[in-house]
Amino acid sequence: MVSKVAVAGATGNIGLPIVQQLVAAKFDVVVLSRSENPSGLPAGVTIRKVDYESIESLTAALQGVDAVVSAVGSAALAGQIKIIDAAVAAGVKRFLPSEFGNDTEHPAVRALPVFGPKIAVQEHLKKVAAESSLTYTFVVTAGFLDWGLQAGFLLGPLKERKAEIYDDGSQEFSATTIATIGRGIASVLQHLDETKNRTVYFHEAVVSQAKILSIAKELTPGETWAVTESKSAALKARADEKLAKGIFDAEVAVSLIKYSIFGPGFDPVLRKLDNELLGIKTISDDELRAIVKSAL
């Protein structure tokens, strides 16, 4: 049984909803933070200041913790190795690394360099789990539906009535709201045996760029939309050009992640779903419309 959960990256775009849902599920939440007073967190959480570069500091902070959920951003993915090693030293039962997006079990996804740090963390966790009492769960939820629309990642700057669609926009993909990602993580920690040492999959909807754009246009009658039609292959070519020069920057990362959603050969609709186990329901058309409306 898990009662005390530590969260790394707790104030980020995905970290905060995770903390909120863990609190709502009555877990005792410990926030690992470089700051003594991180802002925006719900009442009732415990703050433990840590040095993420120090296994000793992390081990001390993880004393008495049953599970660790990492929601660190891309720049800090490799640093999870130290958190994992500290979790082993502190006797933590379960570790959930920062995943929550693409299915990194898929060979085509694994081949993209942008996912290399996540895969390295997975392999380290598998090795550690074979040698210690620490267990793991990899959580795959595909695209972040509400955040992805609001940030312009999935379709473009919708508030400006602009959209960019790739390969006619018909490619379907799974998507999940960030609050539901948090609820799913809480449920994973309530189903330890069923989720032990494996990848867990859930989503709320199967959508496409074309479907979202159609809804957006229906919700903005009489307004003019500027729609750019692009090729997903251009995303890969743009990234490859920079990578050939030894450049790996945010543009490369974003291009490759978009390519893995909108490009061919990645099977972005999740099939092996754990929705029923975790109590995650898919959303209705009206709920999808409301999510799109909130981004307009």
Image (cartoon, rainbow, N blue to C red):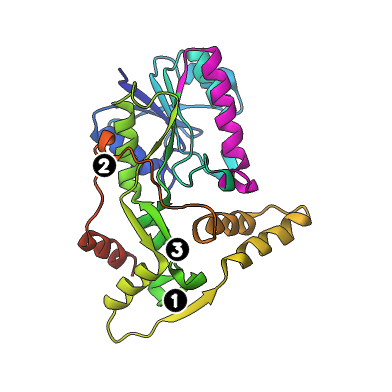
294 lies left or right of 165: left
Residue bearing mark 1: 162
Distance from the alpha carbon under mark 3 to that under mark 1: 19 Å
**Quadrant the C terminus occupies:** bottom left
Please tell me whether mark 3 sits on a helix, a strand or a loop. loop
Q: Residue at x 50, y 78 (%)?
A: 228
Distance from the alpha carbon under mark 2 to that under mark 3: 24 Å
Q: Residue at x 48, y 14 (%)?
A: 90
Q: Earlier in the sequence, mark 2 or mark 1?
A: 1
Q: Earlier in the sequence, mark 3 or mark 1?
A: 1
The residue stretch that appears in magenta = 109-135
Q: Are marks 2 and 1 in contact (CB under 8 Å)?
A: no
Please tell me whether mark 2 sits on a helix, a strand or a loop. loop
Q: Residue at x 32, y 54 (%)?
A: 205
Indicate yes or no whether the magenta region holds residue 10: no
Indicate yes or no whether the magenta region holds residue 118: yes
Give percent across and percent down for residue 240: 70, 58
Q: Residue at x 68, y 63 (%)?
A: 237
Give percent across and percent down for residue 74: 56, 44
Q: Which mark is residue 280?
A: 2
241 lies left or right of 258: right
264 lies left or right of 30: right
Prevailing secondary structure of the magenta residues:
helix
Residue bearing mark 3: 171
44 or 191: which is nearer to us? 191
- Residue 224 sits above or below residue 287 on the image: below
54 or 21: which is nearer to us? 21
Amino acid under disc 1? Lys
